[in-house]
Amino acid sequence: MVVTLIPLLVLPSYFTRLMAGMWGYVTKSLLYIAGISHQVSGDTHADKQVIYAAKHQSAWETIVLLADLGVPVPVMKRSLLFLPLIGLFFAKGGCIAVDRDGGMKALKVMRKSAQSFRDKGRSILIFPQGTRVKPGDSHPYEIGVFALYDSTGLPVVPIALNSGHAWPKNRWRRNPGVITVDCLEPIQPGLSRKEFMAKLEDRIEKRMVALDKIG
């Protein structure tokens, strides 16, 4: 399927983002047939420019949630840009590619890239733990999300979700059910790193206690 979409690469990036949105809605329809649906509560702030900081439990949020949020600029590991063909679409649609082994240099590149997309009026999506985390497991929140918050001056919308119950990490089997997505109170600009990181983790993880029980 990806091969048939190659002509999009010579068109403006808007068309690549449109394709990403359509891919999300097609996936959502197929999951619905398989007995998996989802509900979103809270304000997505779709009419504003924000940074979405979402819990990451499965591939679901990289496809369906991305589409539901209007295809914001995703933060992803740099190695994904080198995947055959699909990497070209990531680059064309716009992404913030991070070298996980790049240290402070990688953070500087992330900040500069985020500022560029901010100036273009686009929202950003980041998974602040940097990896998929199974329901009930713990994993530290990484400093990259603060780099985006601090460098762009945009509010951050924390998102808690329990997609890992329906679409488990590293498992082929899908479990019928309803994925719950909660858009929580935004964190406004101006906080110190310590204050911001504590507030972000507190808001998401407190809500996850209830969501993982629902799942």
Image (cartoon, rainbow, N blue to C red):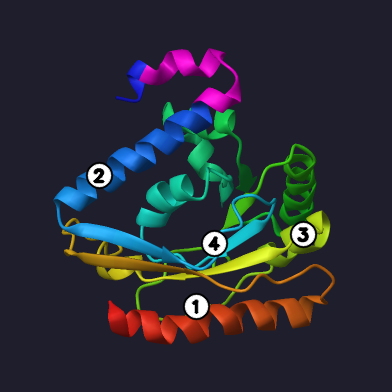
* Residue 72: image location, x then y, percent: 58, 45
Residue at x 40% of width, y 47% of height: 63
The Cα atoms of the two marked residues, 3 and 2, are separated by 41 Å
Binning the other alpha carbons within 10 Å of mark 2 as few (below 14), some (14 to 19) or many (20 upward) gives some
Confirm whether residue 59 shows in the render.
Answer: no
Say which of marks 4 and 2 sits in front: 2
Of the two numbered discs 1 and 2 on the same chain, state the one appearing first in sequence.
2
Q: What amino acid does circle 4 point to?
A: Phe
Of the two numbered discs 1 and 3 on the same chain, state the one appearing first in sequence.
3
- Tag on residue 139? 1
Is-magenta flag for residue 111?
no
Q: What amino acid does circle 3 point to?
A: Met
Binning the other alpha carbons within 10 Å of mark 3 as few (below 14), some (14 to 19) or many (20 upward) gives few
* Residue 10: image location, x then y, percent: 55, 13
Magenta segment, which residues?
A: 5-15
* Residue 103: image location, x then y, percent: 71, 59
Say which of marks 1 and 4 sits in front: 4
Residue denoted by label 3: 104
Of the two numbered discs 3 and 2 on the same chain, state the one appearing first in sequence.
2
Regarding mark 2 in the picture, which secondary structure is present there?
Answer: helix
Tell whether 160 sits left or right of 95.
left
